[in-house]
Amino acid sequence: MRQSRHLLALAAALALSGCALFSGPKVPPTLMTLSAEQARAAATTRTAAAGEAITVVVPTVPEELETLRVPVHESDTAVAYLKNAQWVEMPADQFARLLSETIAATSGRVVLDPRQFTFDPGTRLTGTLQRFGLDGTRMEAVAVFDAALGRRDGGVSTRRFEARVPVAAADAASVAPALNQAANRVATEVAAWVGS
């Protein structure tokens, strides 16, 4: 009797998992990603004295960005998602890597991943990626990053960075390069701020 209950529970779980595999939205033929316009040169060696490294932490995001889909702000109070557009991975993770690449390429400083910060936490760059999508009313790709720079001595600096890039059409082919351009503009400004 007990064994048949376990078998029944297992069969129900398998049936549900089978439904979950096929019930999601269809994945678009092309996935969107970010690429750094200013990437580090291969085989570049950098060293940092104690406290001079920068650790880039994945930014927090509002609920609308906790997805692989691309938000479209249709007004101040309405958000939809771009049809047939999807990120290859979460936008906050991609944005953090873009920041790391850009800071390392333009500042010459040692940039660490949060998993490496035990080597030397130094300066920590974090923040909130407030907007990262399409402004449907103005047809612009928008990236808004509220950065927070925490220094080893306990001091903190904050600054908002924003970039807007015109978009010809509300489709993945037009929005993807515009969002990449907006993200790179923000990353370049953040790198200059961190390096100053």
Image (cartoon, rainbow, N blue to C red):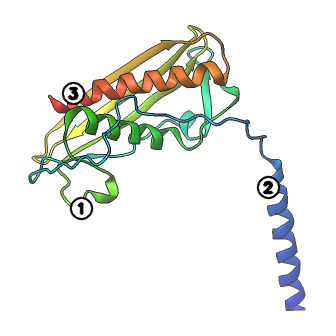
Mark 2 or mark 3: name the one nearer the start of the chain.
Answer: 2
The residues tagged by marks 2 and 3 sit, at their Cα atoms, a distance apart of: 45 Å
Task: Answer left or right for 91 relative to 108.
Answer: right
Q: Could you say whether the residue bearing mark 2 is in a helix, strand or loop?
A: helix
**Residue 28 image point, x, y percent:** 73, 36
Mark 2 or mark 1: name the one nearer the start of the chain.
Answer: 2
User: Visible in this render: residue 154?
Assistant: yes
Task: Answer left or right for 54 relative to 98.
Answer: left
Mark 1 or mark 3: name the one nearer the start of the chain.
Answer: 1
Where 63 falls versus 9 (above or below)? above
Residue visible at 29% across and 58% down?
Answer: 116
Task: Answer left or right for 155 relative to 5.
Answer: left
Residue 33 numbered mark, or none: none
Quarter-wise, where is residue 84 in the image?
Answer: top right
User: Visible in this render: residue 157?
Assistant: no
Q: Could you say whether the residue bearing mark 3 is in a helix, strand or loop?
A: helix
Where 6 falls versus 48 (above or below)? below
The quarter in which the N terminus is drawn is bottom right
Residue visible at 86% across and 70% down?
Answer: 12
Q: Amino acid at mark 3?
A: Trp
Q: Amino acid at mark 1?
A: Thr
- Reading the image, the residue beneath label 2 is 21
Residue visible at 16% across and 43% down?
Answer: 151
- Reading the image, the residue beneath label 1 is 118
- Reading the image, the residue beneath label 3 is 193
Where 171 falls versus 7 (above or below)? above
